[in-house]
Amino acid sequence: MAIKVFIPTPLRAYTDRKVEVEAQGQDVGEVLEHLMQAHPQLRGQLMNPDGQLRSFVNVYLNDEDIRYTGSEKTPVKANDTLSIVPSIAGGSPAAVASGRC
Amino acid sequence: MGLWMPGAQMEAVLRHGEASYPHECCGLLLGHPAADARAPRRVVEAHAMRNANAASPRNRFDFDPKEHLAAQRQARERGLEVIGFYHSHPDHPARPSQYDLDHAAWPGYSYLIVSIMEGRAASGEAAARSFELAEDRSHFIQETVETSGVETESA
């Protein structure tokens, strides 16, 4: 079935500027694969060269991070939405003392 | 390329950095992406986020992923987009660290960094700089930051 996928702002350069696109599949992995076949430039943005999702790429099926629901094997159903959300982290240069001490 | 920001929103980011000192602050830059390759990304609102890094908040920040998802949804419902992120460097310059580079997301976002020295925003140009990730992810490229006292929004 086709479900809605929300595309983060910088990746819309590869989806004809579309904020949301439809992609088909029975599980999250199939939906992502269909998405990347339809928009081939997304593959390098979402996946490592070995075909795994990049470490900073989080995928949510509705409100759930797929890492906790079966990863790419998580089944999808009608009216589900998939969101691609980057992990955001950073920090200043110096390794100051940790708050754990 | 570059970042355009209402002056009041830049002020809000600097005050957030000061209020969070000696911890890092962080947030989203919401607005409108660049209309073309030469146009700036336009900030409508700097949206404060919680620094979810409990272990080392003086020199690290991260977003809680669910809070990020929720904020992204709320922005979309308001017709705004996530065009970048901001964070503070307490007692360090407003320049990306290796850690920032290692944890960057995709090129095409603005990464605004503010320098908070001894609790106060650094003065002048040193207070805030914005960067974009190079296409090959090997380094950050500084981009221009333009602020305006007049909050005009044509979109």
Image (cartoon, coloured by chain):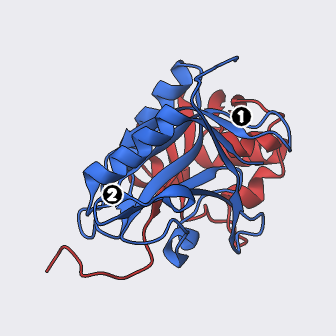
Chain colours: A red, B blue
Residue at the image position 59 percent from the left and 20 percent from the top: B79
Dot label at residue B91: none
Camera sees residue A41: yes
Residue farthest toward the left in the current orientation of the protein: A101
Residue A97: x %, y % from top left: 24, 82
Q: Is residue B152 left or right of residue A16?
A: left
Which quadrant: the N terminus of chain A? top right
The image quarter in which residue A19 lies? top right
Residue at the image position 86 percent from the left and 44 percent from the top: B37
Q: Nearer the viewer, residue B79 or A81?
A: B79
**B30 shown above or below B151:** below
As measured in the structure, the alpha-carbon distance from the residue carrying label 2 to the one carrying label 1 is 48 Å
Disc 1 residue type (three-letter): Ala
Camera sees residue A62: no
Disc 2 residue type (three-letter): Arg
The image quarter in which residue B15 lies? top left
Q: In this view, does B28 lie to the left or right of B155?
A: left
Residue B120: x %, y % from top left: 33, 57
Chain letter belonging to callout 1: A
Residue highlighted by disc 1: A23
Q: Is mark 2 on a helix, strand or loop?
A: strand
Residue B47: x %, y % from top left: 43, 36
Q: Nearer the viewer, residue B118 or B60?
A: B118
The image quarter in which residue A96 lies? bottom left
Residue highlighted by disc 2: B120
Residue A30: x %, y % from top left: 67, 45
Residue at the image position 46 percent from the left and 48 percent from the top: A66
Q: Is mark 1 on a helix, strand or loop?
A: strand
